[in-house]
Structure formats: C-alpha cells, structure tokens
Image (cartoon, coloured by chain):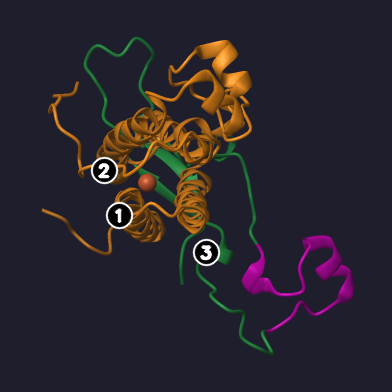
Chain colours: A orange, B green
Amino acid sequence: MWYYEKKLQYPVRVRECNPRLAKFLIEQYGGADGELAAALRYLNQRYSIPDKVIGLLTDIGTEEFAHLEMIATMVYKLTKDATPEQMKEAGLGAHYVNHDNALFYENASGTPWTASYIQAKGDPIADIYEDIAAEEKARATYQWIINMSDDPELNDGLKYLREREVVHSQRFREAAEILKEERGKKVYF
Amino acid sequence: MFTQRKFYTPYVSPTDPCPPIRIKSYETPPQLYLGFQPPCLPQYATAKEALYRGTLWPALYSPYESPYKRGDTGE
Ligand SMILES: [Fe+2]
C-alpha cells in the first residue's frame, strides 16, 4: 500500500501560458517512455523477480508516480487558461475536441497510452535491461524537450527529472550486477 | 568461472493455493560476463562443431535445458 504526501517531489514553476510546449511534454505523461509507463512497468515486474531487487522496483516505481504528478502539473499550468483558439494554434485542436483542457494519457502526437509500451518478460535479466533502456530513453526525451523549450523555470524542473533518470539507470545497472552475482559466495546478514 | 543459471528462494506464504516451488531459477548467459570480447579466444576444434553450436568460441556458448526437465530446481 502507499501513503500520499500532498506536495510535489520538486517544485514546478511555469513562466508563460504555452500550450505548444504542453503538446511536447505530454510525451512524458502518456508516451512509450513516459512516467506512467515507467511506474506501471516497474511495479508490475516486482512479482516475478528475485527478492533482492523487488524493493528497488517498488521504490523507483513509486517515485515515477511522483514524476507523473510533476508532469501533470506542468501540462496543466501550460494549458489551463488556454482558449480553444490557442489550443488549435498549438496543434492541440484535436485534443481540445476530445478532452477540452483535461489531461489525457497520450503521446506528443495524440496516440493514447497502451500497455504494449511496457514489458514483463519474466526473465529477470531481460526485464532489468529493459528498465535500464527505458531510463535512458526517458533521459533522452527530457533532453529533446529541454532543447525545444525556452522557459527557464520549466526547464529547471525538467533538468531535475532528467537527473532522476540518470540515478534510476545507475540503480538498475546495480540490480543487474546483483542478478549476475554467484550465490553462496557472499553471505548477507 | 560463472554459472549460467542462478537460483533463488522466493517468499512462500503458508496460504499459497498451489504447491509452492521453493527454489526458482533464471538464466545468466555468458555475454553478461565477457565484457569486450578479448582477441584470440580459443575456438572450437572443427568448423562443423562451431556451426552446430552457433558460435566459434566456447566462451560464448550457452547451453539451455528446461529447468523443469533437468530436475535441478528441486530441493
Ligand atoms: Fe525513472
């Protein structure tokens, strides 16, 4: 089970109403390498992986939900007072027709989130390597969004999220080493 | 030398409905350990054997048998 803390993991500030940027950012909300996919991927893999790495998947999967909340806040701030006209100019006309200014789990081109974005192969090595790849892809996505954004306050939050992907990748690489270790060589108390 | 199959003991609840498998296994094939392949690794003696194995180098050969068939997942 989870406890909820009613605050963001890192403060989110947005300087200007910019629905165009929201359209790009939604990739990290409902895209293949976004935060929703990450959280669901890790939490679901926990059941069929050696005990030594279950805790890591719980911790990182939980943190991904905290990131999802930050992205949601960014998208919300960027679009909440945008007029239908502004939404249309930002390439969000189709989104507006379907959802008004509501958030939706979709990628930057409007494709709804699908479970086929994530994997649970059951093979611990395959699953952990998928997680490492997912973290690197999320890091890259943040880079490309930062490259297209000229909002320094929003970029501050995005750089924080990018750094967390770096840390997660490192932890999953350590998990791979744990899975590779010979049993019986080291005794843990 | 590393082993190509690792074993672990998952948590077993006293109320599990199926008879629990107490020791489970997963594969850790050689490419996880080799790093950048060093030059001049020993090769199989004959081309025929290399073709049969799917690799020139014994160091990269990963035999696979079902863990259920070999009976080595039991206690
Ligand atoms: Fe992550």
Q: Which residue is mark 3?
A: B32
Quarter where residue B23 is shown: top left
Which of these two is toward me, A77 or B53? Answer: A77
Q: Alpha carbon of mark 2 to alpha carbon of mark 1: how far?
A: 8 Å
> In the current view of this chain or complex, which residue is farthest to the bottom?
B40
For the point 30% across and 54% down, which residue is it? Answer: A156
Q: Position of residue A181 (x, y in %)?
A: 36, 61
* Chain holding disc 2: A
Answer above or below: position of B44 versus A46: below
Which of the numbered marks, if any, corresponds to residue B25? Answer: none
**Residue that mark 1 sits on:** A156
Disc 1 Cβ-to-ligand 1 distance below 8 Å: no
Q: Amino acid at mark 2?
A: Arg
Disc 3 element: helix
- Seen from the viewer's position, the closer of residues B56 and A154 is A154
The residue segment tinted magenta is B42-61
Amino acid under disc 3: Leu
Question: Is B57 in the magenta?
Answer: yes
